[in-house]
Amino acid sequence: MRNELVLKKDPILEFFVQAANNRGFTLDLTLQIEGCLITGTLMSAKDYFMDLSEGFEDSDDITQAISKQMASASEEAGKSGKEEANYIHLKHADIYYGDSNPIPQTGVRLWRGKLSEVEGFFLGRITNTS
């Protein structure tokens, strides 16, 4: 029986995520996950939750409560230090499936996914020329 190393996460991609979370590093990336291409700009977990919270600020009581929870999550993410990265966050994200147009096409495009689900990646973004 052979001992095989089974990687749950790509260590290079995890390094990029840790640099984003700890140092504010940004990088255009395209990820491959279950037949989809997800393209966008890497961002920190703190910035992700802060941007997400801002989307809920100007509404009713329930959405304002959600906004406060996201702002709190942003503060906690900013304190996390050198912990293992389990999620990746992208801004200006587009999702391509097959030869279709990207989803979504308008609005704030934040995306969060599990690092362990990423099958591959390349540096740079896909740009929609249509």
Image (cartoon, rainbow, N blue to C red):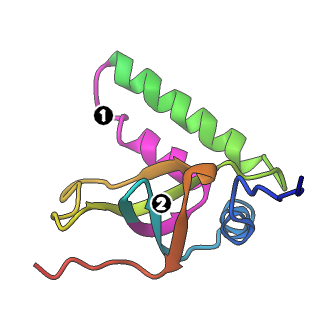
In this rendering, the answer to whether 70 lies above or below 52 is above
Q: Is residue 15 visible?
A: yes
- The picture places residue 62, in percent across and down from the top left corner, at 37, 17
In this rendering, the answer to whether 25 lies above or below 58 is below
Q: Give the residue type at disc 1.
A: Asp
Instruction: Please tell me whether residue 5 belongs to the stretch shown in magenta.
Output: no
Provide the secondary structure element on which disc 1 rests.
Answer: loop
Judged left or right of residue 50, residue 130 is: left
User: Dot 2 corresponds to which residue?
Assistant: 90
Provide the secondary structure element on which disc 2 rests.
Answer: strand
Instruction: Report the number of discs.
Output: 2
Circle 1 packing at 10 Å, graded few (<14), some (14-19), many (20+), is few
In which image quadrant can residue 97 be found? bottom left
In this rendering, the answer to whether 25 lies above or below 86 is below
* Residue that protrudes farthest toward the front in the picture: 1
Return the disc, 2 or 1, that comes first in the chain's sequence: 1
Instruction: Please tell me whether residue 59 belongs to the stretch shown in magenta.
Output: yes
Start-end of magenta stretch: 39-60
- The picture places residue 41, in percent across and down from the top left corner, at 46, 70
Residue at left 16%, top 63%?
100
In which image quadrant can residue 10 be found? bottom right
User: Dot 1 corresponds to which residue?
Assistant: 58
42 vs 36, nearest the viewer: 36
- The answer for how far apart the CA atoms under marks 2 and 1 are is 23 Å
- The picture places residue 15, in percent across and down from the top left corner, at 74, 68
